[in-house]
Each structure stands twice: as C-alpha cells, then as structure tokens.
Amino acid sequence: MDRKVRVRFAPSPTGPLHIGGVRTALYNYLFAKKNNGDFILRIEDTDQNRFVEGAEEYIIEAFKWLGLQFNEGVGVGGNFAPYRQSERTVYKDYALKLVENGWAYYAFDTPEELDAMRKECESQKKNFQYDCNTRQGLRNSLSLSENEVDALLKNNVPYVIRFKFPVNTDVVLNDLIRGEVKMNTSLLDDKVLFKSDGLPTYHLANVVDDHLMEISHVIRGEEWLPSCPLHVMLYRAFSWEETMPQFAHLPLLLKPEGNGKLSKRDGDRLGFPVFPLQWKDPKTGEISSGYRESGYLPQAVINMLALLGWNAGTEQEIFSLEELVQAFTIDRISKHGAKFDLTKAKWFNHHYFQELANEDIAKDYIKILDNLDLKGINTDLTFVVQVVGLVKERCDFLSDLWDNSHYFFVAPQTYDGKVVNKRWKDDAGRRMAEILVEMRHIAQQTPDDDNLFAHNTEEFLHRFIEENQLNIGQIMNCIRLALVGEGKGVNLVDIMKLIGSNETIKRLDKAIKVLGC
Ligand code: GLU
C-alpha cells in the first residue's frame, strides 16, 4: 500500500524566516496538496543559544499572510502533538537506546579538553575530528572501562552522547533531486546527538520526530545534504529503515549576480526584502524590510518563489496557488541554484495588482491619502475608484499610485522645467489663452456635466489644431503640463472628466499666468 504523504516544514526560531525558507515551505505545501497529503509545522527549538524571541510568532504570521495553511503543527495542533521540540521529552530515551545497542556512546571530554585538542591539531596543520580514528584516545564510554563510566555517570559528570559511525562504510542515499549521493563514514565525525544541557541536537530530534510523526518525504534546503548520511545511518541504527522518508534537497536561492547564497546584505544593497514580513531585531532594534510591508501581494510572492528553482516545463509563468498545486512535481525542481530577479518579482506583483478589484485598491489608497493630510482633497470612494481604474495599469504596487495620480487630487504647484522648455515656447502661451476662452464657453454650455465638457473640449481641440494647422503634440502637451505639471499622466479627456470643468479651467488659467502668454 502506498504511504500517506506527510511533509513538514521545520524551522528553527532563530530570527526572521529567510525567503529561501519560505520557498522550502512552499514546495512542501505544493507537494503535500498535490498528493492529498499533510503539511506540518514543526518548530525545532532545541538549540537554546540560538533561540530568538518572537521568531516563532513571526513564522506563523508569515504563513498566514501567504495563505499557506498547515494541517498540523504549532498553532494548529494534531495527533502528533506537541510540535514544538522543546516540549517533547522523548529524545533522551532514544539516545540511550542507541548507547545500549552500540550505535552511540557517552563522551565525557570537557569543552576545554576538546579545545586544547583542536589547538594541538592546528599547530600541526591538521584538522581535529571526533571520529573513528580519534575516539579511542578520548574520554568516552568506548575508551574507558565500564566501571569508570559507571562512576562518572553516578557522579553526574556532564556528558554528551555521540553517534558511533562504523568504520569505512559507504552511506548511499537516493535524493529525489540529486539522484544517488554517496559518502564514506571515514570522512564523517561522530556528531553529538544529545547535549550536556539535557536537550537533543538537531540531528537526533529531527530524525526521531520525522519517524514518530510518520513523515514520508523530507524536502529541505541543500545545506542539510552533508548531514543526510548521518540521518540515514540513524534510521539504520534505530531499525527504522523501512519507513525512512525520501529525501529531496533543494538548490540554493542565489544572489541576482548568480554567485553565492542570497543574503540579507544583498537585499539591503539592491533594495529588496529577503524576508516575508518586516522584522525588528529584539536585541538591536534593527529593522529588516519585508515583502508584505514593501507592498508585495502574497500571490505574487508565491508565484515568484515557485518559479525560482522549479518550472512546469511549459512557457506558463502566471500560476495561482491552485494551479501550482496541480502542476507541481519534484522531478521538475532544478538541480542548480536559482538567481533572484528583482525585475521579475515586480513583474509578478504588477500582474496580481491588476487583478485586484478597483474598489479594494481604492479603500487602501484612501487610507494613504488620509495620511497625507492634504486639506480639502476629494477622497470620495466613487471618485477614488475611478482614479484607480485609470492609473492602476501603470503601477506595480499600491505605493506607486500617488506618483501616478496626484494630479487628480491636487493642482500642480510647479511645472517640470524640461517639459516647459520643450513645449511652452513660441506662441504656445497665446494659443493656450485662445483655448481657455473657448473652454469657458464650453463649460457654460455644459453645466453640471463634466463628461460632456471633456468630450466637447476634446472635439474643439482637434478642430482648433486642424484649422490652425498646428502640431497635435504641441497643443496637447501644453494642456497636459497645465493639468498635471509634467509630461506624464493618463489620457487628457479622462483627466478633464474627473477633475471637472472648473478645475480644468482654473489650472489652465494658472499655467498661462505662471508660464506666460
Ligand atoms: N531546523 C532545521 C532548519 O532550521 C530543519 C532542517 C530540516 O528540514 O531537516 O532549517
């Protein structure tokens, strides 16, 4: 019978979650959903020295924002609770089991002794390793007599429990992404499984929990590949090989230039977040930017991350979460690192920003406008919805709206010098004055109907240009300058419709006064 797919995301709460970690979680999620499996959140917090206040809450909030729901785990519960390793008490028994069956041993060497050993080796230009070659010469239950060990344990002399790698044995694992990976135990050190502080190390806790939680597939970053032979050997030592999960080690997320792992420093240097949410370091107070606070939409972050290291084998780039679930397979994950691409990230956000309802965008935009504290501006929902409808195509983010639509709310205070020099020259001012006279007429004929005013003005302008054999760009750009203050903005008729006849006339009048006839 096929095994139920159960995968876990197992972060250590040592700070904010790196976006590469979010990608790992996403691939786990997609794989679970595709295979009707379970997606589990396990918090691996057995390294007390690295514990950071608030990191666990941050992780949970990040996944809530992204819309990736866990079936079980911290904050959700489930049949295999507790899911926070610091609350699990099973590890010591398992470590002792390995001592009993000869796969592990007590080691009583003090940190000072090990340090001295390391220094001694360094002075001889050698690397110190606690392994099958050195362990007989160190203070452990392999080198000491049974009586000595008993006495040490009785006297509560601190100890760690180390894994006893067999001598010169090939460990082979079949990684779902990398294929066969082989390593010889002679190269590996006897890793600590259980620490003198009474807590397990990552290796022991990870394997024990993956077994007890019936994890079928371990999908994680490739930085864990070197540890995997130890994990495989642990399954052997516990006689759990039959239910050992399958492993898939994901390639790194690389710097935009392509060499080296994407780091927070790259984000600071190039101006993009490397964390899903903003993070305030509880010790230093330092703030790191987040995708959410930078205006990225969760759909965009998910779509972008999915394609950083995986592709569907087609040209398709836009995927909803549901479509990703349908299309996702591990065999289409690349073996090579994926370069982070800021332009692409914005491109994805642009796409999903366009999909939002104008009314929803407008409601958020009104909050921004209210914060600007500009007296007397029109923040009426119907009006703002229309503005959004006109300019959103030019925006990647909510925060781009003001730059692209300020002129709907406030008249220009200044005029772009470059555009003035290029457009407001020769008899442009005089022409504008003629146009202003006619605009006033049109306004009188179309009271209370700004749409008709804009429409009639447009017709008049075209006639005026034709009759006077003028250049269309010249005239229209001068009017644009008067209404917007610069050479950009949406269609002039749309601007006139929305700001209305009074405001249009007022702005043109002012421009003529300021820029001259
Ligand atoms: N706690 C490990 C981490 O922080 C988990 C690695 C794994 O998935 O096995 O990444």
Image: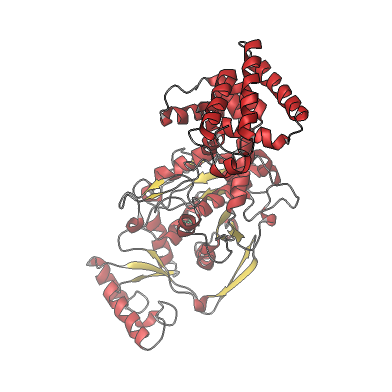
Q: Residue at x 44, y 21 (%)?
A: 376
Q: Residue at x 51, y 40 (%)?
A: 295
Residue 487 vs residue 366: left or right? Answer: right
Residue 36 vs residue 46: left or right? Answer: right
Is residue 82 visible to us here?
no
Would you place residue 267 above or below residue 160 in this image? Answer: above
Give the position of the C terminus as an image quadrant.
top right
Nearer to the camera, 376 or 175: 376
Q: How many marks?
A: 0
The quadrant holding residue 499 is top right
The quadrant holding residue 254 is bottom right
Is residue 271 visible to us here?
yes
Residue 372 pos. (x, y %):
42, 31
Residue 430 pos. (x, y %):
62, 30
Would you place residue 461 above or below residue 117 in this image? Answer: above
Residue 115 vs residue 326: left or right? Answer: left
In the picture as drawn, the residue positioned furthest to the bottom comes out as 124
Residue 72 pos. (x, y %):
50, 41
Nearer to the camera, 258 or 229: 258
Nearer to the camera, 311 or 204: 311
